[in-house]
Image: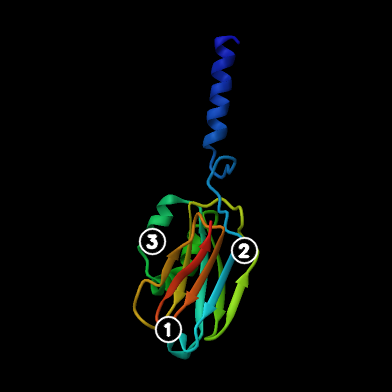
Amino acid sequence: MPKGLRTAVAAALTLLLTLPGCSMFSPSTPLSTISLDVVPKANNDSPVAVDILVVADSDLLKTLLALPAAKWFEQRAQFLRDYPQQLHSWSYELVPGQRLVVDPVPFEGDEAVGVLVYADYQTPGAHRLRLEGLEDAKLRLESKDIRLVANKD
């Protein structure tokens, strides 16, 4: 192969691998099912808002990991406006004693560097979980916080 052609092929491959939004070699989420179980009397016997986020940008993920749930819910609309391609969110509201199974999750296979769950509790705390790398996740919304209780890789 002539040197000029090799250089052109190498340049084309480099361009393809570095294009923004190109998900051919980007990490994706294998998560297919999320179960949410809310204990009776959770959140002072009040509904709990839950947001599941798929984040496709590592700097944005770092920013979100520094936010407790209360700040996320307060600033959610602005984050979604500022990062329409890098951040996707699904919202649910659950009442104490309710069980919800999201199967399949709406983002299975999407490009993602992180998957986060925020729960809007009335008590102070981060109320945030990371779920990337899991195929199935079972979350328990307890009286004052959310936790991952079971998962299958």
Between tags 3 and 1, which lies in front? Answer: 1
Q: Position of residue 78 (x, y in %)?
A: 47, 66
- Give percent across and percent down for residue 5: 59, 15
Callout 3, which amino acid? Leu
Report the residue at 52% width, 57% height from top: 134
Judge by depth and name the residue closer to the eye, 127 or 87. Answer: 127
Cα separation, mark 3 vs mark 1, equals 22 Å
Q: Earlier in the sequence, mark 3 or mark 1?
A: 3
Q: Residue at x 53, y 42 (%)?
A: 20
Which structural element holds mark 2?
A: loop
Q: Which mark is residue 143?
A: 1
- Res 90 quadrant in image: bottom right
Q: The N terminus lies in which quarter of the figure?
A: top right
Q: Which is closer to the viewer, label 2 or label 1?
A: 1
Q: Residues within 10 Å of mark 1 (few under 14, many from 20)?
A: some
Residue 145 is situated, as x and y percent measured from the top left of the image, at: 41, 77
Per the image, label 3 sits on a secondary structure element best described as helix
What amino acid type is highlighted by mark number 1?
Ser
Which residue position holds label 2? 105
Placement of 31 over or under 118, stated as above or below: above
**Residue lying farthest right?**
104
Assess disc 3: are there few (<14), some (14-19) or many (≥20) residues with their C-alpha within 10 Å of its C-alpha: some
Tell me how far mark 2 sits from mark 1, CA to CA.
25 Å
First in sequence: mark 2 vs mark 1: 2
Residue 100 % position (x, y):
60, 76
Vertical position of residue 18 compared to residue 121: above or below = above
Residue named by callout 3: 65
Q: Which mark is first along the chain, 3 or 2?
A: 3
